[in-house]
Structures are given as structure tokens and as C-alpha cells.
């Protein structure tokens, strides 16, 4: 039996989309210790995205993570713009992150140190990543 509803929803009915809080478990080294929210939760999300190899784990969506291992042995003139594009792509998959800019690269032997600014809905975050090529 299909229920009958007499009320019709009008097209001009206003719906509000509520932003969910960023509250999550707080990771401290190898332990979970309480909860964190807002900017600290975003820093943790950025850290987790950039330290998860994309396509390597079945548990994560193919939209999650950062791929860099195929860049090993490539020249820095090729690697720098590719890393910038891949970091931006990896982070902007999160709907709370609006953009990534102000990239700065430096290298020491086989390590590439990348600094950048992540613009989020809870404020700007200075982040960095070291990639060994």
C-alpha cells in the first residue's frame, strides 16, 4: 500500500543547507586522544591527505590521497609544476578547502621541500610537504 500525502511541496520553498562541523578524532603521534575541531581538524585532514598514497589503499576513494612516487628520478624542472598541480588537486577534493597557492620549493640532495598556503572555510593554513625523489 502506497501512502497518500495531501501536501504538495511548492517549488519556491526555501531549503537551507547546513554546513556540518569539522569535529573529528584528534590524532597525536600514534594515538587517538579526544576530539579536535575547526582549524586543527583541517590541519589534520591536510596532513592525512598528503601522507596517503593515492590509489594504494582499497579503503579510500580514488579521489583521496596524493600521488608522487612516479616522480622519483625525474628532473626538478619537471617535478616542481607537477607536484604543485597534484597537491592542489589532492587537497581541493575536500569541499572545505577552497584553494591552494603561494607555493615555494627548495631542494636538498633528493628531498624537495614544498611550502604552500591552503585556503579553507575556517581560515588560511600554512602547510608543507617533503618529498624524497
Image: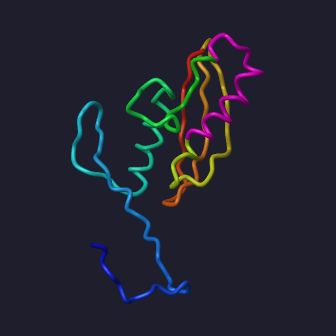
Depth order, front residue of 28/94: 94
Towards the viewer: 90 or 60: 60
Picture quarter containing residue 19?
bottom left
How are the residues colored?
rainbow
Q: In this view, does 2 lie to the left or right of 91?
A: left
x and y percentages locating residue 51 in the rendered image: 46, 30
**Is residue 107 one of those drawn in magenta?**
no
The stretch in magenta equals: 71-90
Residue 1 % position (x, y)? 27, 72
Decide whether the magenta segment is chiefly helix, strand or loop: helix
Number of residue marks? 0
Q: Which residue is drawn at 51% across and 87% down?
A: 10
x 61%, y 22%: residue: 112
Residue at the far front: name it: 1
Q: In this view, does 37 lie above or below 77?
A: below
Task: Determine whether 110 is above or below 19 in the image.
Answer: above
- Reply above or below: 121 against 79: below
Residue 42, percent from left and from top: 44, 49
Q: Which x, y percent locates residue 109? A: 62, 12
Tell me which residue sits at (28%, 37%) in the image. Answer: 28
In the image, is residue 72 part of the stretch drawn in magenta? yes
Furthest-bottom residue in view? 6
Quadrant into which the C terminus falls = top right
Image vertical order of residue 24 relative to residue 1, above or below: above
Q: Which residue is drawn at 49% across and 26% down?
A: 53
Amino acid at each position: 500500500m502506497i501512502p497518500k500525502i495531501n501536501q504538495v511541496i511548492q517549488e519556491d520553498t526555501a531549503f537551507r543547507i547546513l554546513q556540518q562541523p569539522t569535529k573529528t578524532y584528534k590524532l597525536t603521534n600514534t594515538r587517538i586522544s579526544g576530539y579536535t575541531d575547526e582549524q586543527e581538524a583541517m590541519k589534520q585532514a591536510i596532513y592525512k591527505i598528503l601522507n596517503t598514497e593515492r590509489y594504494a589503499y582499497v579503503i579510500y576513494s580514488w579521489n583521496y590521497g596524493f600521488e608522487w612516487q612516479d616522480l622519483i628520478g625525474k628532473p626538478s624542472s619537471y617535478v616542481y609544476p607537477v607536484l604543485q598541480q597534484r597537491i592542489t588537486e589532492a587537497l581541493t577534493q575536500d569541499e572545505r578547502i577552497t584553494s591552494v597557492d603561494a607555493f615555494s620549493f627548495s631542494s636538498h640532495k633528493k628531498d624537495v621541500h614544498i611550502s604552500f598556503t591552503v585556503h579553507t572555510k575556517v581560515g588560511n593554513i600554512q602547510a608543507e610537504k617533503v618529498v624524497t625523489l
